[in-house]
Amino acid sequence: MFKFTRITLFAAIIFFAAACANRQVTRIDPAETPDISGKWNNTDSRLTADEMIGDVLTAKWINNHLTTKGKKPVVIVGMVSNKSHEHIEAETFMKDLERSFIRTDKVGLVQSGKKREELRAEKADQQTNASQSTMKKFGLENGADYILQGSINSIVDAYKRKKTVTYQVNLELTNIETNEVVWIGDKKIAKYVKN
């Protein structure tokens, strides 16, 4: 029994060493993610975010806001739900949306969710631990005028070793004060995968 266990362990070590010897890692440009599995990837997220933010910022609502308020709108990126068949990290896509908004400088962007709570906790801590001259006050946050929310969906059609996957990202921009939906956009990505 003892001898069998030692032989098994030795074989496992040889197999692991052989597997490691065949692995090859090459650094690539993060902007050019190759489509290895056919699943949603970094490039899909970035291109979709850039295109949809470009679309939302050329819609009528932004000129209407500038005309009536006289200043650029403040936007918050809310929840984007993943309703697709894959595990997609929606937070990464939301961060791509925020990055695209900031790049344009056409809207103000405020923090949402847990990061906003962390900022408020830091501000609360400063009330007792920071000097009076550097302490940040409560009640001076920029309130968002609009919230961007949406979902990622997918449709899969498969037969034997072939399949098509269509991702559809739906986003909506809503006026927080009036609940009026001022923009709706969608972006589809279709992929054909053959194994």
Image (tube, rainbow, N blue to C red):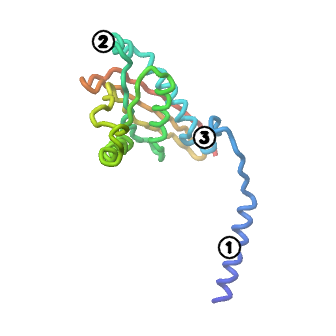
Q: Pick whichever of labels 3 and 1 is earlier in the sequence.
A: 1
SS class, disc 2: helix
Residue 188, horizontal then vertical, whole percent: 49, 29
For disc 3, the marked residue is 193
Q: Pick whichever of labels 2 and 3 is earlier in the sequence.
A: 2
In the image, is 163 to the left or to the right of 61? right
- Which numbered disc covers residue 12? 1
**Residue 113 makes an appearance in the image:** no
- For the residues bearing labels 3 and 1, Cβ distance under 8 angstroms: no
Which residue appears at 58% of the width and 35% of the height?
43
Which residue appears at 32% of the width and 32% of the height?
141
Q: Whole-Å distance between the Cαs marked 3 and 1?
A: 34 Å
Which residue appears at 71% of the width and 63% of the height?
19
Name the amino acid type tagged 3.
Answer: Val
Q: Is residue 195 above or below residue 98?
A: below
Task: Name the foreground residue: 7 vs 99.
Answer: 99
Neighbourhood count class around disc 1 (C-alpha, 10 Å): few under 14, some 14–19, many 20 upward: few
Neighbourhood count class around disc 3 (C-alpha, 10 Å): few under 14, some 14–19, many 20 upward: some
Residue 61, horizontal then vertical, whole percent: 36, 16
Which residue appears at 32% of the width and 25% of the height?
145
Name the amino acid type tagged 1.
Answer: Ala
For disc 2, the marked residue is 68
- For the residues bearing labels 2 and 3, Cβ distance under 8 angstroms: no
